[in-house]
């Protein structure tokens, strides 16, 4: 790792929200000395409460923590209506389509659209407080509008990423018992239309009794199947609705949304977020980590189907009164200069993306940044996966002109917002290092007994005190919530939140995330459960056993590598055919994002005598590492050598 330290740019530090490490430590000390006072003060200052809260934190049913009980608010009001007094004509959302279409929605226009949509959900579809609405949407303003319309009337949205298959969508609809699905005919990608509505049709064709209606936004105008009595045209219906809609008063702990994410076992989990705690931290981190100023243009390239899109395209920026850019396309179309052209055109001040995108743009468009004026940039962010020093340096020098802070933000779907990140005006940055926990977040790297991990040694990345934007439960499965997050690590004898990541702390207290310690793979910053991919592969009639592991990938961070044992021996030609069939099943069951980069057929898997698959051995083989694990306990120790030579022969 590079050991240089990059000091904050003094020019920006002087006006930053947190200006130096003394201010950072003062805030952190305040939180440590009076945790509830710290959070209570911010909650009072930042949120426009309909009714003030009575208590800051209720730990009586830990780990089902409750924040700001007694308080009432509305997140859409916090994100839009309260800004109308001072920012009604400010751009709230700047949309750029894949084809270059542009649309600007001011806060006033956004309020108008959200209210009409909220009224449509209520009047046409009977959606009321607490109902679940699934959004299967492309990156168009109606996605954000629908999220906020749900928030306005107290409905709980569950956004499903548009790259998920019909089966995956169906599982999520059924688990959430959604009454309404909002989708679009499709959208545009790399200059071509692609379709979403047919995926919804397929998902619903196999029985989703809970769904009463499908509301379809027109985006690409392609022909679609229409189911009378079930399908409704968003653009037609919304026209008849009033642009006035009272905000539903919500209790602090009322769920704002569900977002499904992969775990190490079983099917995806419906992570449930709250209203008050979530929006408070979304707004605060937006202000602190991106050093937001009133006239800034902020752009996060994520998709609304992931948590980054929720917190840092929609809720955080709008709660903070910012101008947020929404982009439908991909960074490499029509060329690898697309993002930099947009930065110049919109004079973007904060640019937030994933290391995968940086590596891709570095590789495919090294000279592109030079063609554009990127001088508006002040803060560059990364999220979702570790960033390697080479990509970091290119980002810092070529995109940031060696003057921008790079905020390597570490967090998760479950944390709601950033946990560990540099602060652009304060933190001396070590490249490719998430640095320090944000003020108010008590993040510790501990060993199995809960003691601090020794300096330079891997430990468990835990958040040892509850925080406002934390996951509240797994929808419909509170036991799984406790087991998944509070089962592995303890401190002072009490269960604490374990992220599933390993981390290391250095002599100066800097935290470096070392990656997942469980069976979760991080592909292009997207979380993929090995169990899910394995379950899909097992659906092939000729598969006897399978184990999936992550394989280092130069662009995607990790790729998916599958070891498969077939029921019958096949010829090479048949194996090639099987590879295609297996990937087709994955595409159908999960989506193209879970396709295997490599599939190898092996005679058996390394299993212990009790039948447990030794995944660590399989991981070492893929990485071409020396096998250090004890193989004598295996049912058949000779299998390791056999698998090694098969994988080696594939590499040749
Ligand atoms: O392993 C960590 C990795 O992404 C996981 C969370 O994935 P997800 O819930 O999909 O949320 C992604 C966007 C927040 C984490 O458990 N991760 C996230 N950010 C970083 C990271 N790994 C290293 N460095 C990061 N900055």
Image (cartoon, helix red, strand yellow):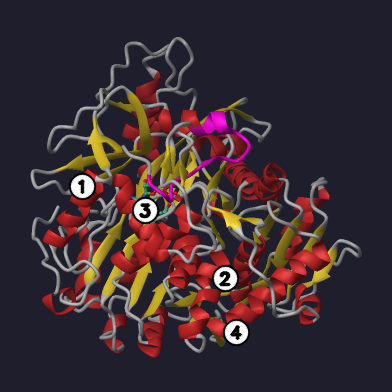
**Residue closest to the eye, 487 or 402:** 487
Q: Residues within 10 Å of mark 4 (few under 14, many from 20)?
A: some
Q: Quick one: label 3 or label 1, which is nearer the N terminus?
A: 3
Q: Quick one: label 4 or label 2, which is nearer the N terminus?
A: 4
The span picked out in magenta is 467-481
Secondary-structure class at tag 4: helix
Q: Say the numbered circle drawn on residue 511.
A: 1
Residue in the image at 68% along x and 46% along y: 176
Instruction: Please give the residue where the numbered disc 3 appears in the rendered image.
Output: 40
Mark 3 or 2: in front is 3
**Residue closest to the eye, 487 or 606:** 487
Residue in the image at 82% along x and 51% along y: 205
Visible residue check, residue 21: yes
| Alpha carbon separation for disc pair 3 and 1 | 27 Å
Q: Residues within 10 Å of mark 3 (few under 14, many from 20)?
A: some
> Vertical placement of 184 versus 236: above or below?
above
Instruction: Please give the residue where the numbered disc 4 appears in the rendered image.
Output: 109
């Amino acid at each position: 790792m590079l050991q240089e330290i990059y000091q904050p740019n003094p020019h920006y530090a002087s006006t930053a929200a947190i200006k130096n490490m003394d201010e950072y430590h003062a805030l952190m000390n305040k939180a440590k000395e009076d945790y509830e006072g710290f959070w209570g003060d911010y909650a009072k200052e930042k949120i426009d409460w309909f009714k003030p809260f009575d208590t800051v934190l209720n730990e009586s049913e830990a780990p089902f923590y409750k924040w700001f009980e007694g308080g009432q608010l509305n997140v859409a009001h916090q994100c839009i209506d309260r800004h109308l007094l001072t920012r009604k004509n400010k751009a709230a959302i700047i949309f750029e389509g894949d084809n270059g279409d542009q649309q600007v929605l001011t806060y006033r226009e956004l309020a108008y659209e959200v209210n009409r949509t909220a009224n449509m959900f209520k009047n046409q579809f009977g959606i009321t407080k607490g109902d679940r609405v699934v959004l299967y949407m492309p990156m168009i303003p109606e996605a954000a509008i629908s999220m906020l319309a749900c928030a306005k009337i107290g409905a709980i949205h569950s956004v499903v990423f548009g790259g998920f298959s019909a089966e995956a969508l169906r599982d999520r609809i059924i688990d959430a018992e959604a009454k309404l699905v909002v989708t679009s005919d499709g959208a545009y990608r790399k200059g071509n239309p692609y379709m979403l509505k047919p995926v919804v049709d397929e998902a619903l064709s196999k029985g989703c009794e809970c769904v009463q209606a499908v509301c379809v936004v027109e985006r690409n105008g392609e022909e679609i199947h229409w189911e009378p009595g079930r399908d409704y045209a968003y653009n037609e219906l919304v026209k008849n609705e009033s642009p006035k809609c009272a905000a539903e008063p919500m209790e602090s702990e009322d769920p704002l949304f569900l977002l499904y994410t992969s775990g190490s076992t079983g099917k995806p989990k419906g992570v449930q977020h709250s209203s008050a705690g979530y929006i408070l931290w979304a707004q605060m981190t937006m202000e602190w980590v991106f050093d937001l100023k009133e006239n800034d243009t902020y752009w996060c390239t994520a998709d609304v189907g992931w948590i980054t899109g929720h917190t840092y395209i929609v809720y955080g920026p709008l709660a903070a009164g910012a101008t947020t850019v929404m982009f439908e396309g991909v960074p490499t179309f029509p060329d690898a200069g697309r993002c930099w052209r947009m930065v110049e055109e919109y004079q973007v001040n904060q640019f937030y993306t994933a290391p995968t995108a940086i590596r891709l743009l570095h590789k495919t468009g090294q000279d592109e940044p030079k063609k554009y004026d990127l001088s508006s940039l002040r803060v560059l962010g990364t999220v979702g996966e570790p960033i390697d020093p080479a990509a970091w340096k290119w980002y810092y020098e070529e995109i940031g002109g060696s003057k921008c802070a790079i905020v390597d933000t570490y967090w998760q779907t479950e944390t709601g917002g950033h946990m560990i990140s540099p602060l652009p005006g304060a933190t001396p940055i070590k490249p490719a290092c998430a640095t320090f926990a944000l003020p108010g977040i008590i993040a510790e790297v501990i060993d199995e007994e809960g003691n601090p991990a020794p300096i330079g040694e891997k430990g468990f990345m835990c958040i040892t005190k509850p925080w406002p934007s934390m996951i509240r439960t797994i929808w419909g499965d509170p036991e799984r919530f406790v087991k998944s997050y509070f089962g592995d690590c303890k401190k002072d004898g009490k269960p604490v939140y374990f992220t599933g990541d390993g981390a290391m702390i250095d002599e100066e207290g800097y935290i470096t995330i070392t990656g997942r310690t469980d069976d979760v793979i991080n592909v292009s910053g997207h979380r993929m459960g090995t169990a899910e991919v394995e379950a899909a592969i097992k659906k092939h009639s000729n598969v006897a056993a399978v184990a999936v592991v992550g394989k280092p990938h130069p662009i995607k961070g990790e790729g998916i590598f599958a070891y498969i044992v077939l029921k019958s021996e096949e010829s090479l030609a048949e194996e090639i055919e099987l590879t295609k069939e297996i990937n087709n099943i994955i595409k159908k069951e999960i989506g193209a994002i879970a396709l295997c980069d490599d599939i190898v057929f092996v005679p058996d898997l390394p299993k212990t005598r009790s039948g447990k698959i030794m995944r660590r051995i399989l991981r070492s083989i893929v990485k071409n590492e020396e096998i250090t694990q004890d193989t004598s306990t295996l049912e058949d120790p000779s299998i390791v050598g056999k698998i090694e030579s098969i994988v080696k022969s594939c590499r040749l």
